[in-house]
Image (cartoon, helix red, strand yellow):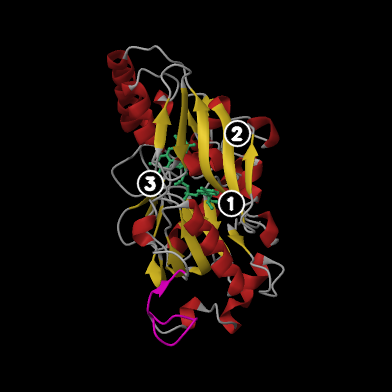
Amino acid sequence: MTLSKDFSTVQAPGSGRSNPKLALAESGHSRFALGQQTAGQSPLGQQPQPIRLPGTDCMIKPQVPLTSLTSFKVGGPAEMYIAPRRLEDLQASFEWAQTHGLPITLLGAGSNLLISDRGIPGLVVCTRYLRYSHFDTETGQMTAAAGEPIARLAWQAAEHGLSGLEWAVGIPGTLGGAVVMNAGAHGLCTADILVDTHTLAIDGTLEVWHPDQLNYTYRSSKLQAHTSLAAAEAIRLVTQATLQLQPGGDPEDLVAATTQHLDRRRISQPYHLPSCGSVFRNPDSHKAGWLIEQTGLKGHSIGGAQIAQRHANFILNCGGATANDIFQLIHHIQHTVEQNWSLCLEPEVKMIGEFQLA
Ligand SMILES: Cc1cc2nc3c(=O)[nH]c(=O)nc-3n(C[C@H](O)[C@H](O)[C@H](O)COP(=O)(O)OP(=O)(O)OC[C@H]3O[C@@H](n4cnc5c(N)ncnc54)[C@H](O)[C@@H]3O)c2cc1C
């Protein structure tokens, strides 16, 4: 059985590599051999100095550790890293990566990612500083930048008397990540309320997408393919989104309802240790957590990674876990569930970089 891997890495034109899986497999012999570099050494020069992105006040930093930028708190460094605040800076980042033949990886809040211990080759573009939000209390529409935390938007919507986003309060991702992942909870999801979303392509083109163009299904969208394709021209970075909420609610009631949602989740899900939320998509027949629990895997661990007692579809970093521990545990769950139920659980978590089965 092979694990499905998602390489949310887009190849920049001119890099001469047509397949990202192959590119990563080749990395041991190329300039992208992160594991072979001297710590802190930039592949773009001998000095590991940050580089100013031409025409902007943004810095591109070499060898940035990603552990603190993901909810699992594991993984190696980004070969190069940038976190732009403005659209023009994003466009300049893409141009810079193309000029240097570097693949691009898109990072939101890192709450649905397992990043390889060997890190990510190329340029990691993080959206967390893309921030603005506007709430129209007449129409009920909320427009916000991709980097806004969706939980924060849920609280703000409630305070503005807008209902319909209470379910998002326990989701630790960005609005952009929610649009791409079709994040949801309690039977509701992003696609249900999305009016439109803006994306930026590698050539700087801006596009507006409506939900019916995005092939939305459970925790899936067409945009996921646009962050993990071999063809560079397919990259689409979500820059902003507009959601339709219901106006005219009582802020006090809505804040209370939002609090209730959060309390419910804290009881049923383990928030006390690093995780990525649900590791597997629920198959049609049963909940993934139930299947894993029935297989007797609750509490099973590999290294510092453990299947949560409170919710069997969560893997927890109990301290000192490596990305590889988590990867092996994911594979062990898939293998055991397949043996018992003849069902292959599909990971919801996106795996980026190089992993090897033991
Ligand atoms: C404790 C916990 C609870 C969770 N509960 C839920 C839940 O109830 N429901 C649920 O659906 N999810 C849940 N999640 C998973 C996660 O929070 C969601 O999938 C979230 O939407 C991911 O957003 P992010 O910004 O962290 O994206 P990331 O994890 O950074 O990225 C996820 C994918 O989206 C791509 N991406 C991110 N931002 C952009 C962008 N702006 N443009 C293009 N591509 C982008 C990345 O390349 C990657 O492929 C939970 C996670 C945790 C840790």
Q: Nearer the viewer, residue 287 or 227?
A: 227
Amino acid bearing label 1: His
Q: Which residue is mark 2?
A: 218
| Horizontal relation, residue 324 to residue 25: left or right | left
Label 1, label 2: how many angstroms apart (C-alpha)?
A: 23 Å
Q: Residue at x 38, y 46 (%)?
A: 299
Q: Which residue is mark 3?
A: 299
Q: Which residue is mark 1?
A: 335
Q: Residue at x 72, y 68 (%)?
A: 18
91 magenta-colored: no
- Give the percent coordinates (x, y) of residue 310: 36, 37
Residue 303 visible in the snapshot: no
- On the rendered image, what quadrant is the N terminus found in? bottom right
Mark 1 and mark 3 lie on one chain; the one further toward the N terminus is 3
Of circles 2 and 3, the one toward us is 2
| Horizontal relation, residue 218 to residue 90: left or right | right
Q: Are marks 1 and 2 in contact (CB under 8 Å)?
A: no
The local secondary structure at tag 2 comes to loop
Tag of residue 34? none
Q: Nearer the viewer, residue 193 or 131?
A: 131
The local secondary structure at tag 3 comes to loop
What secondary structure is the magenta-colored segment mainly? loop
Amino acid bearing label 3: Gly
Amino acid bearing label 2: Tyr
Label 1, label 3: how many angstroms apart (C-alpha)?
A: 16 Å
Mark 2 and mark 3 lie on one chain; the one further toward the N terminus is 2
Crowding near the residue tagged with mark 2, few <14, some 14–19, many ≥20 C-alpha atoms within 10 Å: few
Looking at the rendering, the stretch of residues picked out in magenta corresponds to: 40-53
Residue 178 visible in the snapshot: yes
